[in-house]
């Protein structure tokens, strides 16, 4: 009988173990909430995930538990466990910090934290992780926010070796803590249990042998390795040196050609910056980096080491790769071949200028100018004020409601009162039968659209305030307004540009109706208009056939034009266009930015002269960028929207917020419950409200900053819920680009894309209840048996013995586990070139977060550590 019971017990334990591998997301999170490692402190409420019972998405707060640093250059660490028993995915990071309080923050993934204390001194007493520390995120003073792209995530939990997230905060100047308030700086992790198709990782290039002679003007440290793994896609980079570093540059070398991955001054905030050009690194490519130093001002030789008197040369490349082959960490420490580096681009040797108040390590100087009262006023008293860098915009669900009936929405704009202006096509559509090969509109006989095509809406209620444009247009396209609230519109069927009063009266008409052309008096499918508010000159993007920008006087007289068509088979040059589709005017600078649609980029020009200034391109844009809008917020921001590729799959269709000055990608947004089908135009208001006109959905989407949103949603969902089909409207056709772009057989293949439909099955509640009750009854019975068996074998104190054994099996009880694989720079430096291990235990990935001297403090306003994330594309 005993043998039979033992067998039943063994089978149950095996089944229980198997079931744990397939626990639901909800049960895992509940178990995680009951974890003994959830620390108890002033900020303890932050350590539990925020979940809804029906969603696999959740938030995990990693916050300082109410600390008060007393000494300058303090490094404090804390940790939270990730949900145990199953892999989960970090899809976004949201920092909460004040740059006058926290000098920088870093997140590390660890198998075990350095200690199980609520928080600890990770500058002198302990390090961050017990062994290897995997950098996952960095935030620094004045640094732009770092975001992961769609379908890319850091994988944690399960068998990944990352069981805990450790937060390190460096408090530089602690004057703000004279009132003894408590700090809760940290990061919100957006997470999901849904498997993500692309996994993020870090590739570290690091020089171990650089020597900088005193007063030497220029010294180079070169690193290069041949890459011998599965293809990776870099999307962000971070540079790191101490005080002597002038510039750090990283490249992919393929067939002798050097392609820039990233280049930055290490004296600027050392966060991760976006890789400007989409690229991959394949097996056999060389990954190379150069750090440029100067020895000026030093009286002794400077070598690689942990203090600010020493130097470091690190380039972190954040990449993504297919989840099947994902390697979360790789490194290169091989000194570069001088022959190879003879061909490095000259830019790698040119220091990057920066404003002194942006310097990463010179933060004390700013605060020394404040008196004590001013500093205390900034210190926020009892509770830290959170500085959320660039608010994420989220959809206003169910806006504008079901009352507004629209045709294909081709254009959106705002008037002087920030009312929304919509340009739509009523009962007309643009399909493969709309134009012949000579761009002549075919269904002219049906007449103009018999509806008001220009609607002005209250942006809050969506009530129609004004409606004009009945029986005027055939195929509306772009719309904008001027300072007098006149409407400037284009019609691709008429090949004309109109200026209308708000009552619909015509003030100006350019072009000949239904007559395409390329001279001063004709357009060919013009796409958009932008008006200079100072000079009243206006600019027309023309368009689908002519690939040019035309400047006109306020009276409509031709002034000049620029632009030429780019080739689909060659890299587009500055000033070349493949459908200039949308315009944004920047009044303060007199610049005109153009959404170069089929080249997937933004080009900005001096408006008066047409001089090319710069290109903005990101991997997240994909092949096609449909529209761009500008607002002066936060020093100037661009808003953009992309689109599906004509053939095959590409990046997700989504909206973007960009820093106008730097081109940095600040935010990515898309609808929370549905999908963009074919967003065609975008406009943003000064209050950061964003409107997107969608041709295929025949609707307008509204987005507002997250702090104003009533409902928040996790940015990313897993694969398998993407519903997309492009009907034969503008996607196939606006590109009459079949002649330029795609062959007929490929276009036919594109037409055959099918809808991916979701299905769900209902399960009987009675059956669910029954299935839940059976294992509970079994557990109770087995529990009674085990208790009886234990009493027989061990006596009455067995439970207390087991509890004692378990309490020692936490973090400190598991210190004898296996060493984790990977590079531990602390161990490396301890045995390399005679360096002491002291200081390197603090961090095991960047050789010390401190980079400061032990006692003296000379040359030492430098203290930072290591950081990470940002990234790529998926389906358009």
Image (cartoon, rainbow, N blue to C red):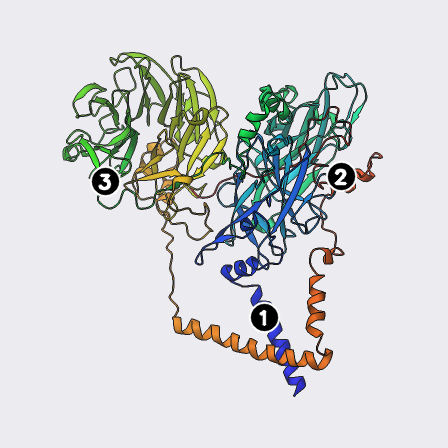
- Disc number for residue 768: none
Q: Position of residue 303 (x, y in %)?
A: 78, 27
Mark 1 lies on residue: 16
Q: Nearer the viewer, residue 685 or 204?
A: 685
Q: Position of residue 143 (x, y in %)?
A: 56, 30
CA gap, disc 2 to disc 1? 43 Å
User: Which numbered mark, 2 or 3, is in the foreground of this view?
Assistant: 2
- Residue at 50 percent across and 40 percent down: it is 149
- Location of residue 214 by image quarter: top right
Ranked by sequence position, the earlier of labels 2 and 1 is: 1
Say what secondary structure mark 3 lies in. loop
Q: Position of residue 646 (x, y in %)?
A: 39, 39
Q: Nearer the viewer, residue 717 or 104?
A: 104
Q: Position of residue 201 (x, y in %)?
A: 61, 43
**Quadrant of the image containing the C terminus:** top left
- Disc number for residue 406: 3
Along the horizontal axis of the image, is 277 left or right of 828?
Answer: left
CB-based contact (under 8 Å), mark 2 and mark 3: no
- Disc number for residue 840: 2
Residue 566 visible in this rendered orientation of the protein: yes
CA gap, disc 1 to disc 3? 56 Å
Q: Considering only vertical position in the picture, is 764 above or below 756? A: below
Say what secondary structure mark 2 lies in. loop
Q: Nearer the viewer, residue 316 or 176?
A: 176
- Location of residue 587 by image quarter: top left
Count residues near mark 2 (Cα–Cα under 10 Å), then give few for <14, some for 14-19, many for 20+. many
Along the horizontal axis of the image, is 240 left or right of 235?
Answer: right
Count residues near mark 1 (Cα–Cα under 10 Å), then give few for <14, some for 14-19, many for 20+. few
CB-based contact (under 8 Å), mark 1 and mark 3: no
Ranked by sequence position, the earlier of labels 2 and 3 is: 3
CB-based contact (under 8 Å), mark 2 and mark 1: no
């Amino acid at each position: 009988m005993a043998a039979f019971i033992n067998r039943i017990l063994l089978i149950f334990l095996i089944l229980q173990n198997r079931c744990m591998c397939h626990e639901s997301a909800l049960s895992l999170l509940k178990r995680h909430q009951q974890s003994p490692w959830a620390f108890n402190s002033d900020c303890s409420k932050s350590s539990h995930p925020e979940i809804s019972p029906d969603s696999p998405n959740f938030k995990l707060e990693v916050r300082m538990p109410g600390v008060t640093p007393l000494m300058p250059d303090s490094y404090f660490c804390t940790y939270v466990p990730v949900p145990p028993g199953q892999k989960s995915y970090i899809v976004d990071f949201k920092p909460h910090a004040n740059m006058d309080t926290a000098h920088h923050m870093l997140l590390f993934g660890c198998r075990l934290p350095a200690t199980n204390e609520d928080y600890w001194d990770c500058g002198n007493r302990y390090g961050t992780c017990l062994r290897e520390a995997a950098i996952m995120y960095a935030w620094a003073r004045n640094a732009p926010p770092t975001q992961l792209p769609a379908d890319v995530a850091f994988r944690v939990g399960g068998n990944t070796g990352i069981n805990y997230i450790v937060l390190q905060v460096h408090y530089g100047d602690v004057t703000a803590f004279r009132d003894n308030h408590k700090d809760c700086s940290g990061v919100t992790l957006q997470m999901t249990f849904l498997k993500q198709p692309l996994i993020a990782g870090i590739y570290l290039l690091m020089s171990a042998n650089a020597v900088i002679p005193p007063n030497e003007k220029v010294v180079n440290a070169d690193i290069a390795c041949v890459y011998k793994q599965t293809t990776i896609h870099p999307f962000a980079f971070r540079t790191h040196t101490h005080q002597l570093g002038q510039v750090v540059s990283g490249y992919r070398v393929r067939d002798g050609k050097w392609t820039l991955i990233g280049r930055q001054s290490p004296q600027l905030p050392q966060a991760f910056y976006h890789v400007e050009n989409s690229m991959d690194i394949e097996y056999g490519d060389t990954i190379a980096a150069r750090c440029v130093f100067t020895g000026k001002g030093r009286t002794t030789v400077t070598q690689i080491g942990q203090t600010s008197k020493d130097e470091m040369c690190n380039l972190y490349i954040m990449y993504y790769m297919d989840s099947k082959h994902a390697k979360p960490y790789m490194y290169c420490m091989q000194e570069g071949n001088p022959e190879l580096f003879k061909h490095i681009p000259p830019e790698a040797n040119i220091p990057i200028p920066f404003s002194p108040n942006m310097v990463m390590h010179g933060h004390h100087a700013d605060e020394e100018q404040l008196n004590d009262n001013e500093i205390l006023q900034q210190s926020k008293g009892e509770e830290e004020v959170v500085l959320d860098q660039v608010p994420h915009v989220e959809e206003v669900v169910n806006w504008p409601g079901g009352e507004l009936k629209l045709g294909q929405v081709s254009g959106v704009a705002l008037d002087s009162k920030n009312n929304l202006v919509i340009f739509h096509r009523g009962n007309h559509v643009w399909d493969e039968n709309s134009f012949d090969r000579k761009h002549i509109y075919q269904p002219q006989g049906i007449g103009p659209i018999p509806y008001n095509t220009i609607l002005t809406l209250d942006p809050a209620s969506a009530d129609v305030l004004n409606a004009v444009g009945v029986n005027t247009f055939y195929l509306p396209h772009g719309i904008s307004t001027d300072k007098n609230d006149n409407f400037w519109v284009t019609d691709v069927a008429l090949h004309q540009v109109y200026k209308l009063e708000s009552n619909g009266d015509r003030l100006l008409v350019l072009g000949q109706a239904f007559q395409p052309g390329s001279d001063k008096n004709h357009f060919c499918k013009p796409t958009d208009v932008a008006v200079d508010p100072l000079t009243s000159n206006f600019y027309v993007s023309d368009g689908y056939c002519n690939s040019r920008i035309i400047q006109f006087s306020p009276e409509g007289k031709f002034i000049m034009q620029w632009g030429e068509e780019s080739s689909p088979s060659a890299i587009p040059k500055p000033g070349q266009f493949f459908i200039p589709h949308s315009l944004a005017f920047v009044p303060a600078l007199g610049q005109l930015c153009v959404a170069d649609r089929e080249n997937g980029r933004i080009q900005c020009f001096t408006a008066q002269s047409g001089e090319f200034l710069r290109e903005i391109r990101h991997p997240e844009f994909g092949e096609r960028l449909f529209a761009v809008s500008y607002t002066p917020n936060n020093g100037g921001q661009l808003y953009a929207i992309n689109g599906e590729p004509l053939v095959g799959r590409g990046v997700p269709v989504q909206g973007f917020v960009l820093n106008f000055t730097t081109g940095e990608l600040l935010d990515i947004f898309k609808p929370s419950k549905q999908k963009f089908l074919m967003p065609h135009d975008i406009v943003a208001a000064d209050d950061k409200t964003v409107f997107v006109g969608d041709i295929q959905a025949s609707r307008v989407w509204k987005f507002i900053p997250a702090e104003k949103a009533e409902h928040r949603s996790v940015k990313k969902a897993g694969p398998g819920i993407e519903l997309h089909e492009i009907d034969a409207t503008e996607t196939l056709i606006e590109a009459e680009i079949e002649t330029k772009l795609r062959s007929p057989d490929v276009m036919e293949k594109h037409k055959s894309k099918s809808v991916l439909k979701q299905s769900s099955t209902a399960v009987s509640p009675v059956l669910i209840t029954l299935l839940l009750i059976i294992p509970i009854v079994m557990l109770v019975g087995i529990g009674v048996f085990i208790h009886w068996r234990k009493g027989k074998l061990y006596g009455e104190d067995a439970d207390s013995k087991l509890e004692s054994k378990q309490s020692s099996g936490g973090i400190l009880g598991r210190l004898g586990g296996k060493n984790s694989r990977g590079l531990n720079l602390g161990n490396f430096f301890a045995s390399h070139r005679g360096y002491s291990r002291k200081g390197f235990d603090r961090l095991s990935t960047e050789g010390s977060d401190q980079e400061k001297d032990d006692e003296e403090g000379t040359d030492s306003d430098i203290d930072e550590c290591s950081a990470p994330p940002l990234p790529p594309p998926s389906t358009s």
